[in-house]
Each structure stands twice: as structure tokens, then as C-alpha cells.
Amino acid sequence: MRENPVKRQLQQGGVAIGTMVMEFNSTGIGRLAAEAGADFVLFDMEHTGWSVETMRGLVAATAGTVPLVRVPATEYHFMARVLDVGAMGLMVPMVHTAEQAGRIAEFCKYPPTGRRGAAFGVAHDGYTGGDVREKMASANEEVLLIAQIESPQGVENAEAIAATEGIDILWIGHFDLTNFMGIPAQFEHPDYLAAIDQVRQACERQGKALGQLCTNVEEAKGLLARGFRCLAYGLDIILYKEALGRGIDELRDDDGKTAQ
């Protein structure tokens, strides 16, 4: 498996900034993101209905940046198959306990670390030959694993989740977390901010990165100042709609007519 620069950046205490895709199933989207300077592209299977076959095409067409995939659930058949088609890392939603985090790492690592099934000379190793033991060791080293913290239980267990061998990033699912805290979308609520601090401190103590999706530059800068080190800047649907809207608004005068 090729080297994962995002994992290296984060292991060295740096910051990684990428983007998230959940609408535009285009062979060009990964390369466009790379051309824009994204460190990674996170393709979503949780809320899109996209299949492993869809991921196969998107990941294969992504060059110049790190392809990551959010799988729908903590299930072996999602994780192992998405890795086999070439994803360099996975995000898993709704991680509530260290035991669940351990299963994620186990599903995604080859023996003796885990129990990922063997398939070589396929997409994940570039269809190449070579020493199988070296390939397994490389894959175990390079795969990036992200556990989403989206519930009070996940916050409570953040320290143990962050301490789990193989987990690299704890990612705040901010909408779901506020929903399950009973304060939907109240991102300045003291209880929510306290929960974020609890997860951040757990990450710092365990040497793991804290991540989140952000939808504008101001929000992103605030997260970085707060100690977040991995950000997905914008969803494709939001970026497209907002950029298009700004352009159209500038072309219209105050009466709503097209500017000449």
C-alpha cells in the first residue's frame, strides 16, 4: 500500500484539511479536490445510498490526494470490501465504546494485529505482486481509521476510544451529537462545548487527532483554534450551491433583473 501522507501529517502533530463528497458521483471529483489542494477526499456511504461498487470507481479515479470512505456502520463486510477496492482510510459513524473501536481496528488490520481477510494483487495493493507479509505490514501501517463521536455515550468513553490501538482520529458528528444531547444544532450551548472539550482533551492525552466537518472558513478557523487538527472543508452540495448562488446574486441588480 502506498504511503498515507495524511496519517503522517497527523502523527507528527500537523493539520490535514480535505473535503467531503456525498452527491457528485463523478470520476473527476477526486482530481478536482486534489487540484484545489485538498489533503484528502472523504466519500460518504452513510447518507448517500452509494454502494461499494460506487466507491470502487470514485477511489480508483482519485489521484493526487488521499481517498477516504465513510462506511454506513461497524460491519466487517463494509470495511474490508471498501479497503480492498482501494480506500486508504475509513470513517465509521456512531462509535460509542472502546469495544466497538477495537472491532473497527480488528476488521481493518491484517493478522496478527487483526482479522482482515486476505486479497492481494487487487486494487488496494495496486494489482502488484510482491511479498505478502510486507504488504500486510504496510497496509496495517498506512490505513487511517476515524471513529465518529456522535452521542453522549461516545463522549463519556472518548478517552478509551482514543486509547484504542489502530484508531487515529476522533471525529465529532456535531449535528448528531447535539441531537442526542437534546440540544439540536445548538453548537454554542455550554453542554455541547464541554463535550467537545472532553473529547479534545482525550485526543491530546492519547496522541490522536480531533476532526470535524466545517462549512465555511470562519467556522474552520475557530475549530483549528480550538485544537482540531483534521477538517473536511465543505460538502460538495454546499460548496456548489453557495458558489453558484454568490455568482448569480452578483449578476442581478436590486430589482432582481439580470445585470447588463
Image: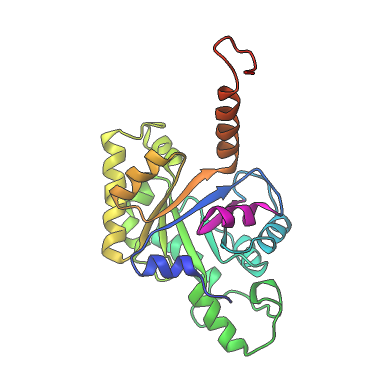
Residue 36 within the magenta-colored segment of the rendering: yes
Residue 114 in view (yes/no): no
Q: Is residue 248 left or right of residue 188?
A: right
Residue 13 locus on image (x, y percent): 33, 65
- Residue shown at 60% from the left, 12% from the top: 256
Q: Nearer the viewer, residue 259 or 237?
A: 259
- Residue shown at 54% from the left, 69% from the top: 108
**In this rendering, is residue 257 above or below 135?**
above
Report the colour scheme: rainbow
Q: Nearer the viewer, residue 134 or 153?
A: 134
- Residue shown at 36% from the left, 63% from the top: 14
Residue 24 locus on image (x, y percent): 67, 45
Residue 64 locus on image (x, y percent): 59, 64
Q: Which residues are magenta?
A: 28-44
Quadrant of res 1:
bottom right
**In this rendering, is residue 60 above or below 154?**
below
Residue 1 within the magenta-colored segment of the rendering: no
Q: Nearer the viewer, residue 18 or 85?
A: 18
